[in-house]
Amino acid sequence: MAIDCRELLQVLDAHRSCDITPYGTRVITHCMYPDSGSVYVHVSRWGDEGYRISDGQDAARCAYTHGRDKHAVEAGLKQASSRFSLDILDTELFATVPNNEWLPSAIMAVANGASYAANVAIDHANQSAYRSLKERLGDSLRRSVPPQYLAKNFEFRGESGKVWHVDYAITKGTFTLFKSVTPHAASIAATYTALADLRQGGSRRLAVFDERPEATDAALLRQVSELASLDKISNLAASIMHLNQTRLDS
C-alpha cells in the first residue's frame, strides 16, 4: 500500500539539517561517504542570481582520514570532476549555476561527486598498497624458493569451474598458493572468494598480510586459508620446500 505523500515528506524533512559554514549554507544530502557518513553540500550566492555549490573539501578530508595519500586524493577529485562536470579548487569540489532552476541538479552533482571522489581515492590507495605487498611477497619468496619452483600470477581452476589467480605458488611437490591481502573489505572479499573455491584437500593456501586484518576478517579468512605475516614468509617458504622435498624422497 502506498504511503501518503505528505506523511512521507514529513518523515524525510525531519532528518534534514541546515547550518552556516565558511563555505556557505550547509545542507545534508542522501549521498554517503565510504565510512557511511552523510555527504553535505555548501551553497552560497554567486553573482546576481547564481549559486556556488561546494563539498567544503569534505571528500578530500574523508579520504585523508582513512590514511590516503595526496596522489590518491588528487586522482579521486579529478575523476569526480570529469564524471560529474565539477570544478576543483585546491581539494574542493564545486559547481556554479546561473539561477535556482539549476540548483537541485547542481546539489546532487556535487554530492554524488564528493562521494565518488572519496571512494576512488580509497580504492586507488588500496590498489597501491596491494601492489606493494605483492612485490614484497615475491622478494621474500625468492630468498628461499628457486625460480624454477616459483610461479607468479598463478592460475587455478576452482570447483565452480572459474579460473582464479593468486600472486605466487610454490610448485615443487604439493602446490602452495600465496595471495596478498590488505585490511580492506574489497581485498578480504576477493581473497576469501578465490581461496574458498579451491578443491578441499588440494593445494595449501596462505593469505599473506603486512597489516593484520581485524579479528572478524581474520576469522573469515581462516575458514579458507592459513594466515601468514609477511615477515615470516621467507622462513615459512624454506620449511615448505624442505617438507616437499622430504615427501618426494620418501
Image (cartoon, rainbow, N blue to C red):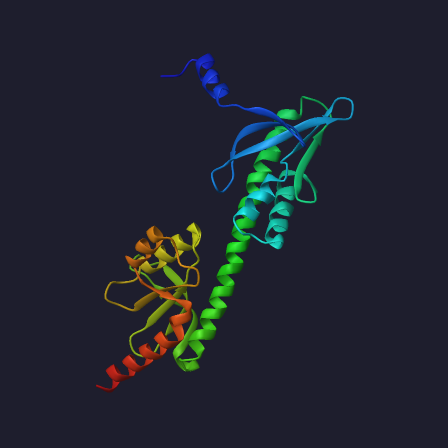
Q: Position of residue 21 (x, y in %)?
A: 64, 30
Quadrant holding the C terminus: bottom left
Q: Is 29 placed above or below 247 here?
A: above
Q: Position of residue 28 (x, y in %)?
A: 55, 28
Q: Nearer the viewer, residue 30 or 200?
A: 30
Q: Nearer the viewer, residue 101 or 187?
A: 187
Q: Is 64 placed above or below 132 here?
A: above
In the drawing, does residue 192 fall left or right of residue 23? Answer: left
Q: Residue at x 52, y 51 (%)?
A: 123
Give the farthest residue toward the bottom.
249
Give the farthest residue toward the right.
48
Q: Is 124 placed above or below 244 here?
A: above
Q: Position of residue 11 (x, y in %)?
A: 45, 19
Q: Residue at x 33, y 51 (%)?
A: 216
In the drawing, does residue 119 fall left or right of residue 70? Answer: left
Q: Quadrant of residue 147?
A: bottom left
Task: Give the total number of marks visible in the rendering.
Answer: 0
Q: Position of residue 138 (x, y in %)?
A: 46, 72
Q: Residue at x 31, y 82 (%)?
A: 242
Quadrant holding the N terminus: top left
